Image: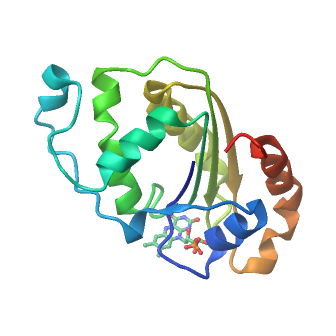
Amino acid sequence: MVIIGSPRENGISAEVLKTLDKEGIWVYRINIKPCIGCNYCKENKKCFIEDDMIEIYKKIERAKVLAIITPIYFMGMPSPLKALIDRLQVYYNNPLIGEKKGFVLMIGERKNTFFEEYYKKIWEYTLKNIGVNNISFFLLGNIKEKKDLECYYNIIDDVKKKIEGLL
Ligand SMILES: Cc1cc2nc3c(=O)[nH]c(=O)nc-3n(C[C@H](O)[C@H](O)[C@H](O)COP(=O)(O)O)c2cc1C
């Protein structure tokens, strides 16, 4: 599955998705309420909130590969994507065992070199609970317009090849 963190239908993430030639789940188009830390999932192995996350949980459990394409918003991720990630608390309390592959592409208008390791750690920590042991993280920095993606075409092409047939 491919998750898109951007609200912009014609933005940079959309352009990367087009290149990968896959369907994406656009978090801004669905309804994912924030985690309230109630610990219901600790006892019940599921979340009590009934929203679009129910479908996302099913997709995550079935997925062999998870790709996330997202802009960087204030050294983090856009809030609907963060809401999705926080709702993975179900799996923090009840980890999925698996061999999923994870691909994360973060896009920023600044270079972000200083934060690269920090972002990578966040994704490793977050996705290991859903059974992603093997994570490929790419920071696509210094992007102000679509043509700035040119220098990352080899990375995007490589990701495309690796997820081909797996999604
Ligand atoms: C609210 C907001 C916060 C942002 N914060 C950062 C940031 O911390 N670092 C950065 O490099 N770019 C930041 N940006 C720029 C976006 O990451 C950049 O424009 C990105 O290309 C947008 O991706 P999209 O076209 O797929 O939506 C921010 C943009 C917005 C709207």
Q: Quadrant of the C terminus?
A: top right
On the question of residue 23 being in view, the answer is: yes
- At which x and y percent is residue 145? 71, 81
Closer to the camera in the image, 60 or 84: 60
At horizontal 63% and vertical 72% (from top left) the residue drawn is 14
Q: Residue furthest top?
A: 97
Callout count: 0
Which residue is pictured at 78% across the width and 48% down the height?
A: 159
Please tell me which residue is depicted at 37% across the width and 41% down the height of the picture: 57
Q: Is residue 109 in view?
A: no
For residue 103, which quarter of the picture?
top right
> Where in the figure is residue 59, as x and y percent of width and height?
46, 43
Is the image coloured rainbow, by chain, by secondary structure, or in one colour?
Answer: rainbow
Above or below: residue 84 compared with residue 88: below
Q: Is residue 70 left or right of residue 41?
A: right
Tell me if 150 is positioned left or right of 49 in this view.
right
Using the rendered view, name the quadrant where residue 95 is placed.
top left
Residue that appears at 68% across and 65% down: 17
Q: x%, y% of residue 115? A: 58, 47
Q: Which is more toward the observer, 125 or 56?
A: 56
Q: Residue 30 in the image: state x and y as whole percent.
A: 35, 65
* Image position of 123 with respect to 2: above or below: above
